[in-house]
């Protein structure tokens, strides 16, 4: 067990170094003046340019710049945003909101996706199954901003069930609509994974044995079929949690949810390059850490995993 | 050789009347030998979803190549602010954008942008994915370690975020090519992983050993024997990556780090219409429908191909 954890932690180090290096390289090793390039069409005041150059040690050789940047990350120093606030302070304020949003979305995914997948799998080839397939394909095809605007228009503007924007200090129920929108991207995957898994389990011998013992279908479905079908689904949901947290940029931006994603969204819209770089780095780190935690959690839950590889 | 055996078959099969039971290893001598692709085609042909998605894709391709066949209205020059957000008018079936441009014409002319980005990304992803996946899976050892770790790094950065960074830096050079490059450079590891796994499975097959025994070189075995037998899952994931690339371009354009507004693109039009969601929802909804239907058709095609190439998926249907 300890060996597995250690090995998994060691494996994470090159990926962490590699991803931060790659992001840094993409920005600062480009030909031309990276600082000017980061601002696109805008020409910021020379003091701002000077501050960014100083912040990223651009007068030093590239590898030294990167090492200093990396050292900053390890000390929790991700730079300073355009408004002059340290990125780490913004993170402390916005991260809990993103966490809440992703958690609510995960609840929707788990409950709705598994339920629909279960019914589809049990009634394979039926009308419910066919329509669930069509709906899930349509949901996969809709870009998240299209879903967000449609939901905002129908439920916010037309029906008036939800407020169209969340804003800071809003009650948690205001996160329900954005969370539902966020969940649509992965919803189809959960439905289909559950469906496939249920169909496979339904054909197993122990299900037939249970039926031949005279157990009612009402008992077989939750106890024998569902519980055994959930293993791959739960794995997927856990990994997806990281994707949801990182993928909330557009949703948080459109619904004005005061999370990490909205900060990145606004920095992108305003063309504040250095802030974009800081937040993308932060999000990649969040994504990596969530994946690492999920892996470690699985080693605790499922002993088989520890022996693989 | 009797007529009961095919030319490639080495063992003799007794005629049915000579054996007490029906010969167990009897093979139908006449008729074409079955193979994965022929079976897949037979399967695909019977599914309405294939014909629907193929028809939509064909239409989208024709629209992208010959927009002039579908509209005579210029998408940019003929805009009149007096028509801002106006409804349908004669000759302008879908109404006007905020700038008073014809929505129908803009959707028609935006098609080639989405499709080109999708195609360039797909080619890039296929080339990089096949190179990395094939060498990592086939040669194993340190080659595999290096290539797979490199893939892990690219895989760990969600590609929309990576593309946001690349496009923020390259905003001066934003074009169909740079945006496709920004997406493609980070989208290939999924393909490489799928191919690597499949090659690990295929390379231990008997026919690979037979080729080795015949003295065929390693590289030639990879090219002629292993790769053609491992390519099926790559085709599925490639079809779907085309759809994802179209969505990615629209998302980047929507965020304002995609294509410059001078290039006609559905993502740009949606981005510009977002402030008028309450007053003129059609300016946002119409290009969104064009985008979603195109993406849906590629995803449906990918689904059908996946089902046809994977016997396990066929059983679940």
Image (cartoon, helix red, strand yellow):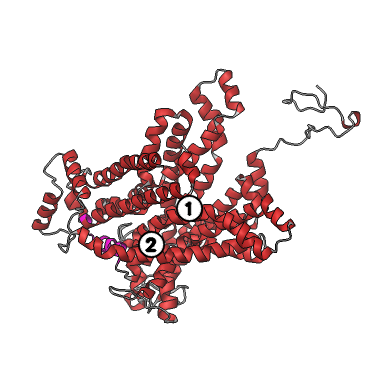
Name the one closer to the observer, B269 or B168.
B168
Please report, as a chain letter, where disc 2 is located. Answer: B
Specify few, some or many for label 2: CA neighbours under 10 Å numbering under 14, 14-19, or 20 or more.
many
Q: Main secondary structure of the magenta part?
A: helix
Is label 1 in a helix, a strand or a loop? helix
Q: In the rendered view, does A281 fall on the left or right side of A303?
A: left
From the top left corner, tell me how far across and down residue B308 is, in percent. Answer: 62, 47
Tell me the quadrant of the picture where the N terminus of chain A can be found. top left
Q: Is residue B226 magenta?
A: no
Label 2, secondary structure: give it: helix
Q: Residue at x 29, y 62 (%)?
A: A95
* Label 1 vs label 2, nearer the camera: 1
Q: Is residue A230 left or right of residue A267?
A: right
Residue at the far left in the pictured view:
A47
Indicate yes or no whether the magenta region holds residue A266.
yes
Q: Both on one chain, marks 1 and 2?
A: no
Residue where numbered disc 2 is placed:
B267
At 40% from the left edge and 56% from the top edge, which residue is drawn? A243
Query: Which disc is residue A46 wearing?
Result: none
Q: Which chain's residue wears label 1? A: A
Q: Where does the image place residue A197, in percent across and percent down from the top left?
A: 59, 54
Place of residue B213 in the rendered image (x, y in percent of width and height, measured from the top left): 58, 19
Where B172 sits versus A127, above or below?
Answer: above
Is residue A141 visible to us here?
A: yes
Q: Would you say B304 lies left or right of B103 here? A: right
How far is mark 1 from mark 2, CA to CA?
33 Å
Residue drawn at x 70%, y 64% as measured from the top left: A216
Count of numbered circles on the image: 2
Name the residue tied to disc 1: A235
**Of the pair A162 and B244, the residue shown nearer to us:** A162
State the residue in front, A58 or B282: A58
Q: Residue at x 38, y 75 (%)?
A: A173
């Amino acid at each position: 067990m300890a060996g597995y954890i250690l090995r998994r932690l060691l494996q994470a180090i090159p990926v962490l170094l590699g991803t931060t290096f790659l992001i840094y390289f993409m920005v600062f090793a480009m030909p031309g003046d990276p600082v000017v390039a980061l601002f696109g069409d805008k020409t910021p005041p020379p003091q701002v340019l000077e501050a960014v150059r100083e912040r990223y040690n651009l007068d030093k050789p590239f590898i030294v710049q990167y090492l200093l940047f990396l050292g900053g990350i390890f000390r929790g120093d991700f730079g300073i945003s355009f408004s002059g606030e340290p990125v780490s302070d913004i993170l402390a304020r916005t991260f809990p909101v993103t966490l809440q949003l992703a958690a609510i979305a995960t609840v929707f995914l788990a409950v709705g996706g598994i339920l629909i997948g279960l019914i589809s799998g049990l009634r394979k080839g039926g009308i419910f199954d066919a329509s669930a397939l069509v709906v899930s394909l349509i949901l996969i095809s809709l870009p998240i901003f299209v879903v967000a605007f449609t939901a905002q228009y129908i439920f916010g503007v037309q029906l008036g069930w939800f407020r169209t924007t969340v804003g800071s200090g809003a009650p948690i129920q205001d996160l329900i609509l954005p969370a539902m929108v966020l969940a649509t991207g992965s919803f189809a995957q959960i439905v289909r994974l559950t469906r496939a898994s249920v169909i496979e389990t339904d054909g197993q011998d122990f299900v037939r044995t249970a039926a031949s013992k005279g157990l009612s279908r009402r008992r077989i479905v939750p106890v024998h079929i569902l519980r055994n079908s959930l293993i791959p689904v739960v794995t997927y949901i856990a990994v997806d949690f990281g994707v949801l947290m990182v993928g909330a940029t557009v949703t948080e931006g459109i619904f004005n949810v005061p999370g990490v994603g909205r900060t990145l969204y606004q920095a992108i819209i305003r063309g504040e390059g250095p802030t974009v770089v800081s937040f993308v780095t932060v999000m990649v780190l969040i994504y990596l850490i969530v994946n690492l935690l999920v892996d470690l959690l699985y080693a605790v839950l499922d002993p088989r995993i520890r022996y693989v590889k | 050789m009797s007529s009961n055996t095919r030319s490639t078959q080495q063992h003799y099969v007794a005629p049915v009347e000579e054996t007490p039971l029906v010969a167990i290893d009897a093979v139908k001598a006449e008729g074409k030998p079955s193979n994965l692709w022929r079976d897949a085609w037979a399967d695909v042909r019977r599914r309405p979803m294939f014909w629907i998605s193929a028809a939509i894709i064909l239409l989208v391709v024709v629209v992208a190549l010959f927009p002039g066949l579908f509209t005579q209205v210029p998408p940019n020059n003929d805009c009149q602010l007096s028509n801002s957000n106006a409804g349908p008018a004669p000759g302008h079936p879908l109404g006007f954008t905020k700038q008073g441009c014809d929505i129908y014409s803009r959707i028609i002319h935006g098609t080639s942008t989405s499709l080109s980005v999708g195609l360039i990304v797909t080619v890039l992803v296929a080339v990089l994915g096949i190179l990395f996946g094939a060498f990592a899976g086939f040669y194993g050892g340190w080659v595999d370690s290096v290539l797979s770790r490199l893939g892990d790094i690219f895989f760990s950065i969600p590609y929309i975020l990576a593309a946001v960074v690349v496009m923020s830096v390259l905003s001066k050079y934003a074009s169909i090519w740079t945006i496709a490059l920004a997406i493609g450079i980070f989208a290939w590891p999924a393909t490489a992983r799928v191919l690597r796994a499949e090659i690990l499975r295929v390379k231990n097959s008997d026919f690979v050993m037979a080729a080795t025994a015949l003295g065929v070189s390693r590289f030639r075995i990879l090219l002629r024997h292993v790769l053609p037998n491992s390519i099926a899952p790559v085709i599925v994931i490639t079809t779907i990556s085309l759809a994802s690339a179209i969505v990615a371009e629209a998302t980047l354009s929507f965020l304002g780090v995609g294509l410059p507004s001078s290039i006609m693109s559905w993502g740009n039009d949606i981005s510009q219409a977002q402030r008028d969601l309450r007053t003129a929802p059609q300016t946002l909804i119409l290009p969104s429908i064009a985008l979603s239907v195109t993406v849906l058709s590629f995803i449906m095609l990918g689904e059908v191909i996946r089902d046809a190439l994977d016997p396990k998926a066929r059983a679940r249907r």
